Each structure stands twice: as C-alpha cells, then as structure tokens.
Amino acid sequence: MEATGWLIVTRSGGQQTSGRRIVLGGESFLVGRSASGVTPDLAFADLLISRRHCLFTRTDEGWMLRDLGSKHGTAVNGQALVAEANYLLRDGDQISLAMGAVILRFSTQDPSLENTMDISRLPADEVGYAGWALPFLLDEDSHECRIGDTVVSLSAKEWAFLKLLYDEAEQLVPYDRIRKEVWPERQAGPDAVPDVGIDELNVLIYRLRRKLGPVGRYIRTVRGCGCALRRS
C-alpha cells in the first residue's frame, strides 16, 4: 500500500499560488468548502467549490479520487470525472476543481525534497497551455482572430475579452475580473470593480459568439460566476 501522498495548491480563487503543500493523511481526505455542518480536511472559500466537492481515498492500488457530485465538477489532466466514480491518481496528475477555480497537483514524493522541476513533466496548465488544440489563433499585432483561412475583426473590447479567455483556457474567469480587464476606463481605483451590468456583459458575449460562428460554442458561461473557454 502506498504510504502517503501530497497535494500542491498551484491555483486558488482564480490566482496562481506559491504552492501550498498538504500531506494526505488517514485513509480518506475530503476537499470542499467550509460551511455549517461540513468541515473538509482541505477547505477553500471560493463559492464555486461545493461543500463536499471531492474525496481522496487510500487503497492497495494507491490514492483514488472521486468527485462527490459537485456542482461545477472535477477534472484530472483536463478530463472531467464522472461523479461518484473512482479515478486512480498518478504522480504529477493535475486536478482541477470547478473549471480551474482551484488547481492541485498530486505527488507521491515529498515536494520539499524536490530541488528542481522538469518543465516538460509539469501538467499542461502549469506551463500556460490548456492541453488541447485551440480552434483559432489570435494575432496580437492586428487584434484579429484567425479561424482557418478566415480573419475575424474584433472591437477593442471583444479582443480584450477573447484574449483573456484565451490566456486562461479551460479556467473559469470571474465576471469581476472580466469587468476590470475589458472596461478598465471605468475603474474608480486600483481595486474597484467597474460598474458594468450583466446585460452589458451578455451583449458582449453574444456579439463575440456570433462573430466566431461555430467556434463561439467554446465560450461557456456559469450563471452568476463567470466565463471560460472550454473544450467541452
């Protein structure tokens, strides 16, 4: 039986982290959001994380991961898990909770003993790539989107929005971050969220999807939370 395992938090609340390390103790380890009557072994404050989001269980084969029917799902190396089905983890596996609201890396070796990291062995999102062939290219000089041989001209705000989703492919981008990066001229201060209503956001999403045609289906929205550029 594998004696122990570790989780390294590489992303939390939509932001990169310095790599908090947690040892998986006991026979099972619950990850979720702290709430009345629920105390996960590893808790996150992000509202996209379910109270009982996923469970790590130690078995004779190794550590198993199971999504507990969470609202926004769990994925391993970009592949969504079927709720309540066990997945055998391997060293280096990347675990994404709620479309990237939280990203964990599973390790079978004590991370404190890792002197260097081979970037070729890191999970895709940790090296800034979504792990799938994006269906279009962005030309930063002309602010155009290229879909095959077709060039799609974008307005300044359409470009800013699509570039943000492109850079964070497969990750949920909160609406407040979209407001700050697409409408920076409306910010009253460095931490202020621009006064942009949901109707204005919906119009931007609608217009961009329409311009992109069939590719627009990759722009997904999570009601009341944000948007993501997702493969499925």
Image: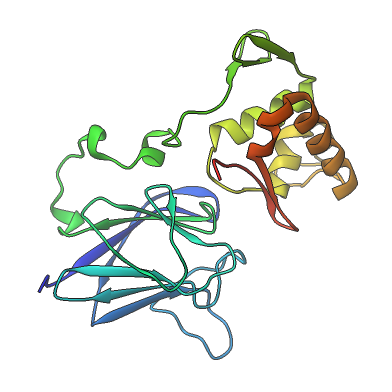
Relative image position of residue 59 (x, y in whole percent): 19, 76
The coloring applied to the image is: rainbow
Looking at the image, residue 223 lies above or below residue 209: below
Q: Residue at x 20, y 35 (%)?
A: 118
Indicate left or right for 150 with 100 as reference.
Answer: right
131 vs 115, nearest the viewer:
131
Residue positioned 54% across, 91% down in the render: 37
Q: How many numbered circles does the render carry? A: 0
Q: Quadrant of the N terminus?
A: bottom left
Q: Height in image: 158 above or below 86?
A: above
Q: Quadrant of residue 81?
A: bottom left
Quick one: which residue is furthest to the bottom in this view? 37
Q: Position of residue 153 (x, y in %)?
A: 75, 14
Judged left or right of residue 173, residue 12 is: left
* Residue in the foreground of this view, choosing between 196 and 155: 155
Q: In the figure, residue 5 lies in which quadrant?
A: bottom left
Above or below, 8 against 185 in this view is below
Task: Name the image quarter holding the C terminus.
Answer: top right
164 horizontally vs 130: left or right: right
Residue at 18 percent across and 55 percent down: it is 112
| Image position of 173 (left or right of 39) | right
Residue 136: x, y in percent?
58, 22
Q: Is residue 129 above or below residue 99?
A: above
Find residue 52 and report its horizontal and vertical position in percent.
49, 77
In the image shown, does 218 or 50 lie closer to the viewer? Answer: 218
